[in-house]
Image (cartoon, rainbow, N blue to C red):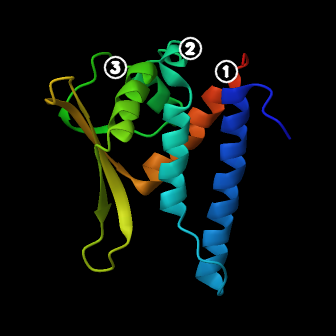
């Protein structure tokens, strides 16, 4: 099956892959099965969702205010340093895109089990000065990814 509308179709396929890996991870906890790494798949998915659309597509991401999105069930963004230039979805995704694209991420783990519990992402200016940093637990990040997938499937109707 070919990609007819690149960004929209990539988002739809990403959702299917994430669902598959998450189901396999839940089965793995109950009985032996294939080894899957749902957090790794989540990060790979986020990389693709943020990098593939390229800069031109970012202008199509709605500028929904983050507090309004939280009222609709989106996860709260736990900013630990600085602030977004604008408190909206487009700016959040731009900063996340920059963080992921430049490797400005750090995995957070439980000190006793070493299980990944979250992710820290930051944005830097062109001069390498950190101007924003946020922390997500895995559930928040997963909710953010799935909600962003919905937006991408709706907004990116053109190839």
Residue to which mark 3 is pinned: 87
Image marks 2 and 1: residues in contact by CB distance under 8 Å: yes
Residue 119 seen: yes
Can you identify the residue that label 2 sits on? 60
Q: Residue at x 54, y 56 (%)?
A: 41
Q: Nearer the viewer, residue 106 or 143?
A: 106
Crowdedness near tag 2: few (<14), some (14–19) or many (≥20) residues, C-alpha within 10 Å: few
* Label 1 crowd bin: few (<14), some (14–19), many (20+), radius 10 Å: some
CB under 8 Å between discs 2 and 3: no
Residue 113 in picture, x, y percent from top left: 33, 79
> Based on the displayed image, in which of its 4 quarters is residue 154 positioned?
top right
> Is disc 1 placed on a helix, strand or loop?
loop
Q: Which mark is residue 156?
A: 1
Q: Residue 60 location, x and y as percent? A: 56, 14
Quarter containing the C terminus: top right
Residue 77 in view in this figure:
no
Residue extending farthest to the bottom is 32
The x and y percentages for residue 98 are 35, 31
State which tag comes first along the sequence, 2 or 3. 2
């Amino acid at each position: 099956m070919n990609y007819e509308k690149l960004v929209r179709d990539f988002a739809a396929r990403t959702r299917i892959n994430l669902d598959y890996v998450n189901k396999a991870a839940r089965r793995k906890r109950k009985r032996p099965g294939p080894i899957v790494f749902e957090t790794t798949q989540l990060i790979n998915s986020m990389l693709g969702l943020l990098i593939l659309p390229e800069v031109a597509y970012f202008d199509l991401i709605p500028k929904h205010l983050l507090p309004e999105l939280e009222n609709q069930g989106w996860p709260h963004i736990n900013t630990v340093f600085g602030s977004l230039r604008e408190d909206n979805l487009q700016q959040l995704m731009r900063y996340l895109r920059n963080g992921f694209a430049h490797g400005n991420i750090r995995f957070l783990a439980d000190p006793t089990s070493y299980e990944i519990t979250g992710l820290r992402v930051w944005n830097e200016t062109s001069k390498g000065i950190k101007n924003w940093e946020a922390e997500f637990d895995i559930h928040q990040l997963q909710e953010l990814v799935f909600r962003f997938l919905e937006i991408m499937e709706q907004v990116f109707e053109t190839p």
